[in-house]
Image (tube, helix red, strand yellow):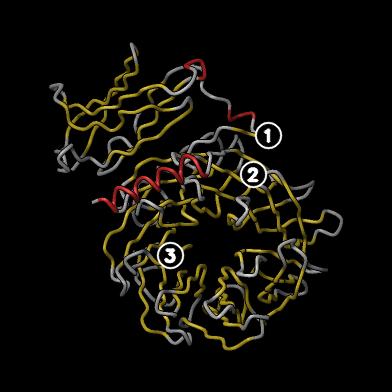
Amino acid sequence: MRTFSILLFLSFISSTTLFPQISFERTYGGYGTDYGNSVQQTTDGGFIIAGYTLNLGTYWEDVYLIKTDSSGDTLWTRAYGGELFEEGWSVQKTVDGGYIIAGRMASFFPWYSSNVYLIKMDSSGDTLWTRTYRDGEGYSVQQTSDQGYVIVGGTYFIGPEDGFVYLIKTDAVGDTLWTRTYGGEWYDVGYSIQQTTDGGYVIAGVTKSFGAGEEDIYLIKTNSSGDTLWTRTYGGAFDDTGNSVQQTTDEGFIIAGYSDNLGAGALDVYLIRTDSSGDTLWTRTYGGVFDDTGNSVQQTMDGGFVIAGVTASFGAGDTDVYLIKTDSSGDTLWTRTFGGDGHDDGKSVQQTEDGGYVITGGTRGDVYLVKTDPDGYVGISDNKFPSLELPHAWALSQNYPNPFNPTTTISFKIPSEAGKKQHVNLTIYDLRGRHVKTLVDEEYKPGTHQVVWNGKNEQGQQVSSGIYLYTLKSGDKRYTRKMVILE
């Protein structure tokens, strides 16, 4: 008991004293199109972002690397490439203090061809060496325990619509030790890789060769030599894709992507929790009536999960960055959206040392970096988002979908005129006024907020179908709406 209390105290100290909260939104780029595919926090508390930048003079894309301080201010940028299309898809810190980037070096004329592109740089972003590996694209890279590297992506023998999952293992200077391919007679590709505690690897991606539908989530577990130990597919009759995988603390796996088979809309964020053999423990979907996708997942310090992706169902514009925080069972704790009135998306997320989150992606043709506090809120903006102004009036929106089964999303707004945090209570009642479930009973900052109800009461039991009321209260303000749950 004493040890547990000390750990709690140290956790509190580390999150409140050693690492003061910083939150912001930043954009980076020039006159062309720039995009962030991957972000990591660096040892100095800043961030490293990898993606691509478009040279308007030649219309070639180059790998783009941005180093910032802890407030998101640029320390330096680098571009890598030549007279082809080069993109950086994944960046990782290396044990020598530098960075490794995996991506592609492609040509579209007179026909499509692509090579996996690997770049090693020092702590200042200066190139130490580069390597290319024939006939493929590299989507995810990790430094391995022997200080070499492992890259996963796709290799194409006919064209970009036919190919295999491609796994490359290198030594510390990028020379190939071995390669492996996985898949069948159709299109298969790997999007995410992690070295596992047994020294092997786990890969998540998509397969058209196996599974129940047009595309299915593909999970591959290998030994340290890349030999297959087992594979699993997840999905239904329509498309399902796995974009991100991480081994969990119990040696199982968490996979994030999207599904066209489950959920409330066209595409929905899809989260799959498995045991160490890849057998499903539970699945969850998140989203609304339009397309919502999950691009990156990480297990968080509290044992739950954070997902970053894109939502067309919620937010301020065409699409917005979608951040979802869940508990260890995948039940939603909160969701946040970021962006303006155009197209914004989130590609990569990491929990930061202060307990907050950092997300990168794209907005209005620029690299987008969002740093939140532990509750997913942002305090400082670089003013490139005029549509992100806070609401000017209290509002309780109609839940969506409605009618629903089993989950629905309720949105409410706290105006800027309210000042700082406001204590908010959001409670579900039946038509007789009997208490069903308290969804919110805490302080919230001004802004637009979303809460998901899974149709369960305070005792965790699924409620019966019928009409229910949900009421938002704050001070002397009270707003009520009706919703319908169907069996």
Q: Camera-side residue: 485 or 440?
A: 440
Mark 2 or mark 3, which is nearer the start of the sequence? 3
Q: From the image, which quarter does the C terminus lie in?
A: top left
Q: Camera-side residue: 173 or 8?
A: 8
**Residue labelled with disc 2:** 363
Give the CA distance from mark 1 to mark 3: 33 Å
Give the label, 1 or 3, closer to the camera. 3
Height in image: 79 above or below 480?
Answer: below
Image spot of residue 100 (x, y percent)? 65, 68
Q: Residues within 10 Å of mark 2 (few under 14, many from 20)?
A: many
Which residue shows up at 51% across the image and 50% down it?
Answer: 352
Mark 1 or mark 2, which is nearer the start of the sequence? 2
Which residue shows up at 69% across the image and 46% down it?
Answer: 366
Q: Residues within 10 Å of mark 3 (few under 14, many from 20)?
A: many
Residue type at the position of mark 3: Gln
Give the label, 3 or 2, closer to the camera. 3
Task: Check whether the beta carbons of the residues at disc 1 and disc 3 lie within 8 A of each other.
Answer: no
Q: Camera-side residue: 96 or 65?
A: 96
**Residue labelled with disc 1:** 384
Residue type at the position of mark 2: Thr
Residue type at the position of mark 1: Lys
Mark 3 or mark 1, which is nearer the start of the sequence? 3
Image check: 235 left or right of 364? Answer: left
Height in image: 236 above or below 305?
Answer: below
Task: Check whether the beta carbons of the residues at disc 3 and disc 2 lie within 8 A of each other.
Answer: no
The count of marks equals: 3
Task: Check whether the beta carbons of the residues at disc 2 and disc 1 lie within 8 A of each other.
Answer: yes
Image spot of residue 272 (x, y percent)? 35, 61
Image spot of residue 67 (x, y percent)? 69, 53
Which residue shows up at 44% across the image and 22% down it?
Answer: 414
Judged from this view, the residue extending furthest toward the front is 2
